Image (cartoon, rainbow, N blue to C red):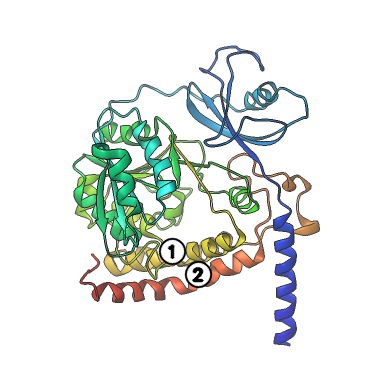
Amino acid sequence: MAGVRRAWQEARTRREIEGFLGIGPVQVAELDLGPEGDGRAAGDEGAELRPGPGSPPVTSGTVFLLVRRAGRPVGTVLGQVPEGADPTEVLSGLARKLPQGAPPGPSPRPPSAGVVVATRERADQLGRALDSLLAQDHPDFEIVVVDNAPVTGETRELVERKYGERVRYVCEPVPGLAIAHNRGLAVVRAEVVAFTDDDVVADPRWLSELTAPFAADPRLGCATGLILPARLRTPAQVLLESHGGFAKGFTPRTYDPAHPPADEPLFPFTAGRFGSGANMAFRTAVLRAVGGFDPATGAGTRARGGDDLYGFVRVLAQGQRLRYTPHALVWHHHRETWRDLETQAYGYGAGLTAYLTAILVNRPALLPAFLARVPGGLAHARGLTAVRATGDDADPAAAEGPGGHDSRTHPWPRRLSRLQRRGMLYGPVGYLRARRALRTVGLETR
């Protein structure tokens, strides 16, 4: 009986992979409509259409479009440009259907910032990220590259040859993303420390928008921003973005532990809703005061992930606020293959429960609040790993690609859901193994 079930599951996985391979590419572009209320008509010269970072000019076909007003992101839409049609005219018509919203007020002068980029043997991607970071309009910032457990000297050579005094190079021999981030945290000199990845392209206003909220709110301990796909060329990239990607929407929001949000009954333990590690910043003194990130979490450790979520909850547990701002944008290069998605699904599941284990180990006072949320947490976990409609049960519109934020158009394969659940079961074990491994190199968690 077990053999029959296994064969049935393998056949279903093959069908899912075949369907996955049939997902077509989607163009990525952005369109700026200018200021709110300018009264321009669709297709006029006021709308400026640009391809996404590293993408060719927009042509006919399916387009994933970021819509801006006066440079600030306000939403995404999925558009179909007919053969021979003017892409700007077609996409402008769709973009203007988005709600305008209230115009943003003036931003305060952002505090000094240090940007930490942890990397390992990806010099080609790192160069692209550093070029975008050096183009930031922030008035006072530094960049620190942390070379994590390098095998070659390529990263050091790139930084020293191309970026000279503009970028600081630091080597961290112990592998682990949280360890690398803690090394960067230790050397930055700025009031706010921002973290991003080596596979992003930062919008020119990213750092200013991400750090300005700290100047406006003295109780703000953390800020996160918007992450959108830089490319949707492969089935894996389209599938991931269709399932929500890394975006958290286009509505700014402040999370305050003194006033828990009524629509977040699991607060603060659903930290994945707050943001992601590719686009986050902390008040430097606050992050140092909580001991930085738990070195037994994160990519490169047996815990597989969860370092960013750990940082969010630790800061909130100190009574500090967290601010999500969609105006702080980075473009992320999603993983490209089915195998990448399998690794990512398992790692996300493991990282989720690993970070929860880390929180309870390091902050046992949070255990009663955690236990009170266990029933809701189990329901939340089932929702995270739910299988979306497939085959004949899928919405026919789902075949096109990602649409507006969180539309989750393509079905999520059962194989990936199972891997995510397995990762969740493994996470606590992986975290404890990672703690034990740290002792062998003389590192302790806090």
Residue at position x 27%, y 63% from top?
173
In the rendered view, does 195 fall on the left or right side of 249?
Answer: left
Q: Residue 168 has which mark?
A: none
Specify the amino acid type for callout 1: Gly
Q: Amino acid at mark 2?
A: Gly
Spot occupied by residue 89 in the image (x, y as percentages of width and height): 68, 21
Image location of residue 113, percent across then percent down: 26, 37
The numbered mark, 1 or 2, whose residue comes first in the sequence reads 1
The answer to whether any part of residue 347 appears in the image is yes
Circle 2 packing at 10 Å, graded few (<14), some (14-19), many (20+), is: many
User: Seen in the image, is 435 located left or right of residue 129?
Assistant: left
Residue that numbered label 1 is attached to? 351
Q: Residue at image x 57%, y 69%?
A: 419
Quarter holding the N terminus is bottom right
SS assignment at label 2: helix
Residue in the foreground of this view, choosing between 104 and 242: 242
**Whether residue 125 is situated above or below residue 423 in the rendered picture:** above
Give the numbered dot on residue 423.
2
- At label 1, counting other C-alpha atoms closer than 10 Å, the crowd grade (few under 14, some 14-19, many 20 or more) is many
Task: Find out whether the residues at labels 1 and 2 contact each other: C-beta distance under 8 Å.
Answer: yes
